[in-house]
Image (cartoon, helix red, strand yellow):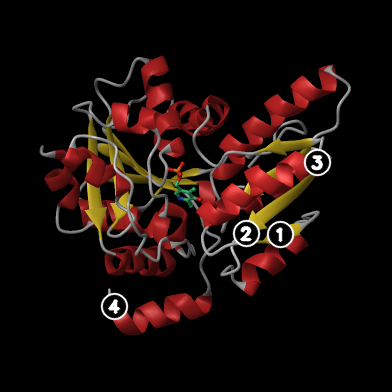
């Protein structure tokens, strides 16, 4: 992995998985964004957002203090990126936030952790209404719904194109929370002129399936409640752009259970020695039972290539894997 001083994300490896390829019956490549400095692809989008704001404020002689509301990866990415660029960041988290996450944010050098409300939505409202107005240098950091975030996330697809030496993959599989990652991927496929030929599979877990339900309803809906354990997918409403992109025939939406996602995490741990969170594990189930072909609605030849975005590896522990091993058993 390489990293520029003024770029708070890394170029991550793209590796072929022999085990998953055998399972799926085609070439499976893993894009290892769990190896980003913050442990998730959010280093890209949020890192780019911070870079843009820093460039603007340097021109005005200002020194911003960044604020994110988050129950996880967005907060970590904001703090890690700000620190690496020499700026301060604070995070508003719900009171339900785990001590492990609070400790992690401290370890990464967070300036202040403010605990407020029952959900990330409550924390976000408090940040906007109370915290930001009190800091003249305060700059809000959105987790997914901003063009600068999409531009940063698009670098993952740029890298894949370079790493595949111009060869087009048949499909790219990405997880969808609010849709910032998918927007970046589709935007870059358009730029490459590849969007007619490369399918995008938008993965969600049951209970965090805001895109899938919006597609069924034919309008953007808001989930009344998030019931999935895949926390980074727990966004009640997807971005407008994501809903638009998902109308394309090349973009398909798929939903699997938390149990399926946990099985995916166990497979990656066992066969690739990688610890990833449920959000990333859910993509792995597509390699079983010819599920890729079922989801894409077409046959894949043995030399077809599918890229799975391994989006993050923070919300995972040995204990969680051991518990899932008991619950979801042998694989
Ligand atoms: C944030 C996040 C997602 C969802 O990304 P969106 O841009 O909100 O769709 C998926 N996986 C991981 C690991 C994340 O941190």
For label 2, the residue is: 93
Q: How many labels does the image show?
A: 4
For label 1, the residue is: 114
* Dot 4 crowding, Cα within 10 Å, few <14, some 14–19, many 20+: few
Residue 262 in percent (x, y) is at 35, 68
* Mark 2 element type: strand
For label 4, the residue is: 328
Q: Is residue 133 visible?
A: yes
Please name which of the two marks, 3 or 2, marks the residue nearer to the observer.
3
Q: Which residue is drawn at 26% across and 63% down?
A: 257
Please name which of the two marks, 1 or 4, marks the residue nearer to the observer.
1
For the residue with label 2, is its CB less than 8 Å from the closest atom of ligand 1? no
Looking at this view, is 196 or 61 the one in front?
61
Question: In the figure, residue 160 lies in which quadrant?
Answer: top left
For label 3, the residue is: 135
> Label 4, label 3: how many angstroms apart (C-alpha)?
48 Å
Residue 52 in percent (x, y) is at 69, 25
Apparent side of residue 215 relative to residue 325 in the rendered image (left or right): left
* Dot 1 crowding, Cα within 10 Å, few <14, some 14–19, many 20+: some
């Amino acid at each position: 992995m390489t990293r520029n001083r003024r770029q708070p994300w890394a170029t991550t490896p793209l590796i072929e998985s022999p085990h998953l390829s055998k399972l799926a019956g085609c070439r499976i490549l893993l894009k290892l964004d769990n190896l980003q400095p913050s442990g998730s692809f959010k280093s890209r989008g949020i890192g780019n957002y911070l870079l843009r704001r820093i460039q603007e404020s340097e021109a005005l002689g200002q020194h911003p203090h960044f604020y994110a509301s988050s129950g996880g990866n967005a907060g970590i990415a904001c703090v890690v990126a700000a620190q690496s660029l020499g700026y301060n960041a604070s995070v508003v988290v719900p009171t339900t936030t785990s001590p492990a996450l609070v400790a992690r944010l401290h370890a990464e050098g967070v300036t202040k952790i403010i605990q407020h409300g029952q959900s990330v939505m409550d924390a976000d409202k408090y940040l906007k209404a109370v915290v930001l107005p009190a800091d003249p240098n305060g700059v809000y950091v959105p987790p997914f719904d901003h063009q600068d975030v999409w531009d940063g996330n698009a670098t993952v697809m740029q890298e894949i194109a370079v790493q595949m030496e111009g060869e087009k993959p048949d499909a790219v599989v990405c997880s969808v929370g609010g849709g910032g990652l998918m927007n970046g991927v589709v935007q870059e496929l358009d730029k490459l002129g590849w969007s007619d030929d490369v399918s995008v599979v938008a993965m969600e877990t049951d209970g965090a399936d805001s895109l899938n339900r919006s597609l069924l309803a034919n309008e953007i809906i808001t989930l009344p409640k998030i019931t999935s354990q895949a926390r980074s997918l727990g966004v009640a409403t997807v971005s407008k752009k994501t809903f638009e992109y998902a109308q394309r025939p090349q973009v398909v939406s798929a939903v699997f259970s938390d149990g399926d996602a946990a099985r995916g995490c166990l497979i990656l741990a066992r066969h690739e020695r990688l610890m990833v969170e449920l959000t990333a594990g859910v993509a792995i189930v597509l390699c079983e039972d010819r599920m890729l072909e079922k989801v894409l609605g077409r046959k894949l030849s043995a030399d077809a290539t599918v890229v799975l975005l391994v989006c993050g590896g923070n919300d995972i522990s040995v204990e969680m894997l051991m518990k899932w091993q008991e619950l979801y058993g042998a694989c």
